[in-house]
Amino acid sequence: MSTTKKLTTEENTALLETLKKRFEKNPSRHKGIKWSDVEEKLKAAPEKLWTLHQMEESGGEPDVVVLDEGSTEIIFCDCSTESPKGRRSVCYDHEALEARKKFKPANSAMNMAEGMGIEILNTEQYHQLQELGPFDTKTSSWVKTPKDIRELGGALFGDYRFGTVFIYHNGADSYYGARGFRGLVRV
């Protein structure tokens, strides 16, 4: 992932074309939204394009989704079928990463999300995403964990199995090759 928060003209053009193609391929994710409106907002917010590039580069396949019917914001969410490949094998947050004495993962979901400029989905958003199609049928994704659970050392994650969205718990310091995280960015 890039360390500068600005895209080259070529990266910008390529990203907008990728996002447009995905937008047009999946109209059920964003009924009532026009690409021209999305593109206008993106061009006015170059820092959001950098964030979307980070999402794309890590395998998130961001697309416009409607999670809040009354909002005027454009919301891009990771819509990769499985948890993004470039964001797996991470524990939940920095505190969990620091607490782990051996076999530490390279990073945490919360650290990565902050560095990318995205919000990790909460349980409600994760359920809403699953209404757009089955996601995480072979993987799982960390979701934003309520403070009281996190203070006790736990963290939440979700997946989709047997036609059902499941939200589970695990130690925040745990990490697995098939668990990553999904995020969103508001434009």
Image: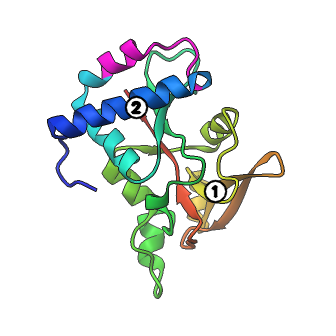
Q: Is residue 124 left or right of residue 80?
A: right
Mark 2 residue element: helix
- Amino acid type at circle 1 is Phe
- The residue at which mark 1 appears reads as 157
Foreground of the two, 69 or 34: 34
Q: Is residue 75 left or right of residue 8?
A: right
| Quadrant of res 132 | top right
Q: Is residue 163 above or below residue 131?
A: below
Q: Earlier in the sequence, mark 1 or mark 2?
A: 2
Q: Position of residue 23 (x, y in %)?
A: 48, 26
Q: Nearer the viewer, mark 1 or mark 2?
A: 2
- The residue at which mark 2 appears reads as 19
Foreground of the two, 165 or 58: 58
For the C terminus, the quadrant is top left
Magenta residue check for 56? no
Mark 1 residue element: strand
Q: Is residue 92 left or right of residue 135?
A: left
Mark carried by residue 107: none
Determine the residue positioned at 58% across, 27% down.
67
Determine the residue positioned at 20% across, 55% down.
3
Q: Is residue 127 above or below residue 41?
A: below
Q: Residues within 10 Å of mark 1 (few under 14, many from 20)?
A: many
Q: Position of residue 52 (x, y in %)?
A: 35, 39
Highlighted range, magenta: 29-41
Q: Residues within 10 Å of mark 2 (few under 14, many from 20)?
A: many
User: Farthest residue toward the right?
Assistant: 162
Q: What main secondary structure does the magenta stretch of the protein show?
A: helix
